[in-house]
Amino acid sequence: MHVMKMFDLTGQVAVITGAGNGLGVELAVAMAEAGADVVCADIDMARNEATAARVQALGRRALCVPCDVTREADVAALFQSAEQAFGRVDIAFANAGIADVAPQPLHDYPTDNWNAVLAVNLQGVFYTDREALKIMVRQQRGKLINVASMWGLAGASSVAPIPAYNAAKGAVVNLTRELALEYATQNIQVNAICPGFFRTRLADGKYDDPDFVAAVTAFTPMGRVADASEIKGTALYLASAASSFTTGLMLVTDGGCMAK
């Protein structure tokens, strides 16, 4: 296959949770630009519909589905809707995520905040992966991509204490490895993206704080924060035939932070 054809997603269908915000928007645009139809899922339907409109403006079909990934029934309905509308699911991004409510060391950490972060960032990934894999196993093909974090590979307290986020993303990293092994013989590749500092709403306005921006910029060897659109190439590689012999990979996109 010609190398550029490897990245062509024409005729494929991608499901993206958290499609209304941040990296999810860029994941949806990347899939559409490469030729895929996109199922956009988010709890924020106004933003979700805006993402779907961007997909349609690129000439691709879009399905906009309300989905709270902490609700098992919502995630099941999402994938049922995708399969009913398009007859297949080739690519799925378990992308929906939230930050710790406030950076706090564990001895001060409220139980409700812990449960809220794990409900989205780990339980939501479990529901998403399980429902995607039900379809992919029947198809005997698929690309499942979990959005983890560089903080799933290292502690974050050199920047800020975020124990719930670290715990959830670390679990997603090892879940990705486990699923890669479970489905390696079924033509299903399971990988994860581990982003560093990207300008998204996940940080709840912190990128408007010059002190925060200065701190994370200084921590990043490349000396800058990434634009959200810089996730697109990483996502396309893992979603496409270019990664046909790649599974169980944690693809770190962090400006060099984890190389320290």
Image (cartoon, grey):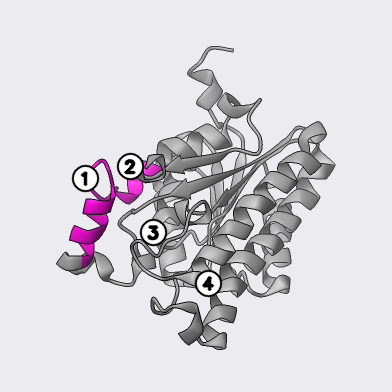
Would you name the residue on which mark 4 appears? 164
The first of marks 3 and 4 along the sequence is: 3
Q: Amino acid at mark 3?
A: Gly
Q: Secondary structure at mark 3?
A: helix
Would you name the residue on which mark 1 appears? 223
Q: In the figure, 30 relative to 245: above or below?
A: below
Q: Nearer the viewer, residue 95 or 164?
A: 164
Q: Secondary structure at mark 1?
A: loop
Q: Nearer the viewer, residue 21 or 121?
A: 121
The first of marks 3 and 2 along the sequence is: 3
Mark 3 and mark 4 residues within 8 Å of each other at the beta carbon: no
Residue 117 sits in quarter: bottom right
Would you name the residue on which mark 2 appears? 255
Camera-nearest label, 3 or 4: 4
The picture places residue 179, in percent across and down from the top left corner, at 73, 46
Q: Give the number of marks.
A: 4
Residue 236 counted in the magenta span? no
State the CA–CA distance, disc 3 to disc 4.
Answer: 20 Å
Image point 18% across, 59% down: which residue? 214
Mark 1 and mark 4 residues within 8 Å of each other at the beta carbon: no
Mark 1 and mark 2 residues within 8 Å of each other at the beta carbon: yes
Packing grade of label 3 (10 A; few <14, some 14-19, many >=20) is some
Would you name the residue on which mark 3 appears? 22
The picture places residue 105, in percent across and down from the top left corner, at 44, 78
Q: Which residues are magenta?
A: 212-231
State the CA–CA distance, disc 3 to disc 2.
Answer: 18 Å
